[in-house]
Amino acid sequence: MFLKCFKSKSFSQGTVIVKLNIKTRGGLVKFEKQYKGAEKKKLDLHLAILPFIKVDTNEIPLEYTIGIIDSDINNNKKNSYGITCYQNGIRINVSNGVIRSYGATKSVYQKTNNYFDAVKIELNRNVSGFVVPKMPEV
């Protein structure tokens, strides 16, 4: 059923037009969105989690460091970052970010004393994504 309502067509230079038609009691509802290749941007971000192990932080006190390294030498001076950690869908506390710049590379680090199972990374408050780290249990 879903594939009958959804169609996409690719054009030159990475442009894609996506159409969604939904039948309702009141008639057909049509949605159309055009995505251009120029809107897509490869991010040169790297995520670090130290230590990369899963422990019960109630039994063994442990401080995790979560870091983002931005190697985008053309934009990283103006980029801003956000790190939010979750455990079982509940947001946990992380410290304020410490920002460092070394030549063309910029990094931000935050710390938490709680285990987490998901990390939300934000760039410039308009781009975000989730990482679900598979840390080995100790």
Image (spheres, rainbow, N blue to C red):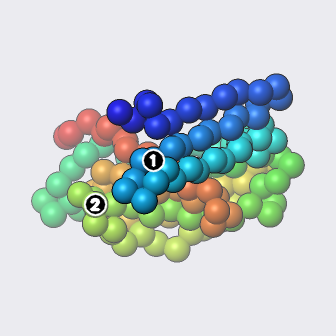
Q: Position of residue 9 (x, y in %)?
A: 66, 28
Q: Is the C terminus in the top left, top right, bottom left or bottom right quadrant?
A: top left
Would you place residue 42 above or below residue 50 in this image? above
Quarter in which the N terminus is drawn: top left
In the picture as drawn, the residue positioned furthest to the front comes out as 26
Question: Residue lying furthest right in this view?
Answer: 74
Residue 41 can be seen, yes or no = no
Kind of residue indicated by mark 2: Gly
- C-alpha distance separating marks 2 and 1: 32 Å
Q: Which mark is residue 22?
A: 1
Element type at mark 1? strand
Q: Secondary structure at mark 2?
A: loop
Q: Residue at x 43, y 30 (%)?
A: 3
Q: Could you classify mark 2 by the number of other residues whose Cα lies within 10 Å: few (under 14), some (14-19), or many (20 or more)?
A: few
Q: Return the residue nearer the eye: 31 or 132.
A: 31
Q: Residue at x 45, y 47 (%)?
A: 22
What residue is shown at x 51% (from left), y 53% (from top)? 29
Q: Which residue is mark 2?
A: 89
Mark 1 neighbour class, 10 Å CA radius: few under 14, some 14 to 19, many 20 or more: few
| Residue 40 in sight here | yes
**Mark 1 residue type:** Ile
Position of 23 with respect to 33 (left or right) is left
Give the mark, 2 or 1, whose residue is nearer the N terminus. Answer: 1
Q: Which label lies toward us, 2 or 1?
A: 1
Q: Residue at x 39, y 53 (%)?
A: 24
* 99 sits left or right of 91 in the view: right
Task: Give left or right: position of 98 versus 49.
Answer: right
